[in-house]
Amino acid sequence: MSATVSDDDFSYVHDQVRRFVRDDVVPRENEIMAADRMPDDLRTTAARMGLFGYAIPAEWGGLGLNLRQDVELAMEFGYTTLALRSMFGTNNGIAGQVLVNFGTQEQKKQWLERIASGDVVASFALTEPGAGSNPAGLRTRARPDDRGWVLDGRKRFITNAPLADLFVVFARTREPSQHGPGIAVFLVPGGTPGLSVGPKDAKMGQEGAWTADVILDSVRVGETALVGGDEEIGYRAAMTSLARGRVHIAALAVGCAQRALDESVAYAAASTQGGVRVGEYQLVQAMLADQYTGVAAGRALVRDAAAAYDSGADRRVMPSAAKLFCTEMAGHVADLAVQVHGGTGYMREVPVERIYRDVRLLRLYEGTSEIQRLIIGGSLVRDRLASSAGTPI
């Protein structure tokens, strides 16, 4: 996808986001962690800056950034508590992109401008107790009736569910067959009778980023709720949105790792042990070197993956490779950051302690590291077989 925002204009946007993150959000990280919520004034500022719709096309009220520009902002969002990005991540990403790429004109007109402004918070309701990284195991059902569709099922770990105004719900309309997986996607407004949200999840990290179960008990929606007006769109919509989202998550991981590296360098340069600066110990320098190298490699891979996605050259293998490498790298860099800090790094309210907990989730959602390895390895083998078909051995 070509850029609709010029390099000069994007440079201004990037600079504004960086200042917002570092001047307004970073100083309040412990406040956000303690309260387990994002302050209203930060949400208002983010909405005013257009952050709820930066990846939504301009015709629908967004900024229209492509993925190459998206990842530059994501690396800034990753520099602070991931609760910030969680506020508007699904609006721009996996939920919003379903509408952008697969919605009817009427569906886009009804929802996208309000999603881009932040007036509507969208949730991507795919994961279930028995269907996480592989949507093929979906159990939520949608059956047609004379007024539209009736949905029954339970979703799990749904980001922003306690706040959501719109749920993008994936449901099975029939058993999988040679004609397709039988998965459709529906737009379910919050407050629809039969839809309820469970208690807010208590998580290891990412305080302020709320998730919860979503229960659908004979939820009735009209025919216009079926995204794209086509029962066969659901699985393709999920895979397309997740592939784009994986590059975004990889960029978030790079931002987290950069923050962990910066905190490590600052601590090593300022703190002493036995009258010697921590950073003068060669083994500490080795840890800093490993952190730096991982961050630099991750940043390069993310940028390459985003460019390949935008050009259409690769929307499967590179997104998975970027997510796999960068999220694993961020976990390693965060672990080294705690090690560089010693006992101090294990204390609550020290940034690297929060980062250590926050980044652990990055290896799980939008496809675990194991799923990424299967996608990459399987694709490489299939491509090789396809290219050698008919070639004498």
Image: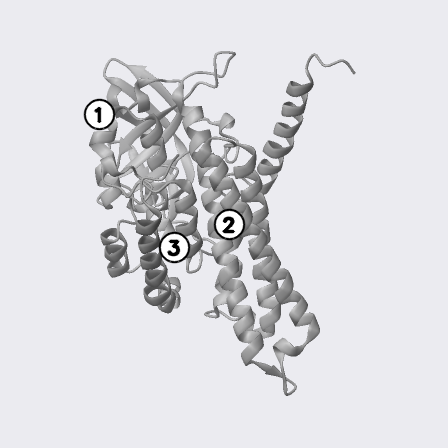
In the rendering, at what x and y percent does residue 202 appear?
43, 53
In percent of the image, x 69 and y 18: which residue is there?
Answer: 388
Determine which residue is flagged by label 3: 83
* Distance from Cα at disc 3 to Cα at disc 2: 12 Å
Determine which residue is flagged by label 2: 361
Q: Is residue 169 above or below residue 123?
A: above
* Distance from Cα at disc 3 to Cα at disc 1: 32 Å
In percent of the image, x 37 and y 60: which residue is there?
Answer: 18
> Of label 3 and label 1, which has the lower sequence position?
3
Determine which residue is flagged by label 1: 106
Kindly identify which numbered label has been placed on residue 194.
none
Figure disc tally: 3
In percent of the image, x 51 and y 53: which residue is there?
Answer: 254
Q: Is residue 270 above or below residue 160?
A: below
In the rendering, at what x and y percent does residue 374 appear?
62, 33
Q: Is residue 141 left or right of residue 130?
A: left
* Distance from Cα at disc 2 to Cα at disc 1: 36 Å
> Of label 2 and label 1, which has the lower sequence position?
1
Judged by depth in the image, the label closer to the viewer, 2 or 1, is: 1
